[in-house]
Amino acid sequence: MSTKTKKNTQDLSAMSEEVLLNTIEETELRLRKMEFSHAITPVENPMSIRILRREIARLKTQLRRTELGF
């Protein structure tokens, strides 16, 4: 695991459920907007769509961990 990933995981574990939910909503909205604009005109960096999807997955995983008490 890279240093950057460890740091992000530690940052996520410090977030409360409310903050995680708000961040998920904001990130999903950014993803929808980016996908829509990509359908009309190609995005300069299409890898950014993948990065956002993975970020959402990380956030949802952390939210589930906090719900389960890990």
Image (spheres, grey):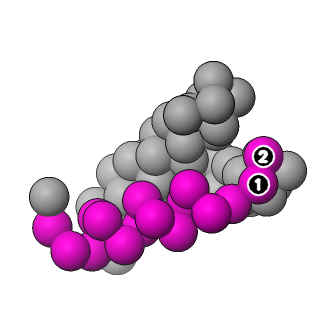
Question: In the drawing, does residue 23 fall left or right of residue 10?
Answer: right
What residue sits 55% from the left and 42% below the top? 62
Q: Residue furthest front?
A: 69
Q: Position of residue 26 (x, y in %)?
A: 74, 58
Nearer to us in this view, 47 or 14: 14
What count of labels does the image hold? 2
Residue picked out by circle 1: 16
Viewer can see residue 41: no
Q: Secondary structure at mark 2?
A: helix
Q: CA distance from mark 2 to mark 1?
A: 4 Å
Please give the range of residues in magenta: 2-17
Residue picked out by circle 2: 17
Q: Main secondary structure of the magenta part?
A: helix
Q: Report if the CB atoms under discs 2 and 1 are less than 8 Å apart.
A: yes
What residue sits 55% from the left and 59% below the top? 12
Q: Residues within 10 Å of mark 2 (few under 14, many from 20)?
A: some
Amino acid type assigned to the residue bearing label 2 in the image: Glu
Q: Position of residue 32 (x, y in %)?
A: 63, 48
Q: Position of residue 6 (x, y in %)?
A: 30, 65
- Where is 65 relative to 10, above or below? above
Nearer to us in this view, 27 or 60: 60
Residue 59 is labelled as none
Question: In the drawing, does residue 59 fall left or right of residue 33?
Answer: left
- Where is 48 relative to 58, above or below? below
Viewer can see residue 6: yes
Amino acid type assigned to the residue bearing label 1 in the image: Ser
- The quadrant in which residue 30 appears is bottom right
Q: Residue furthest top?
A: 68
Q: Residue furthest left?
A: 1
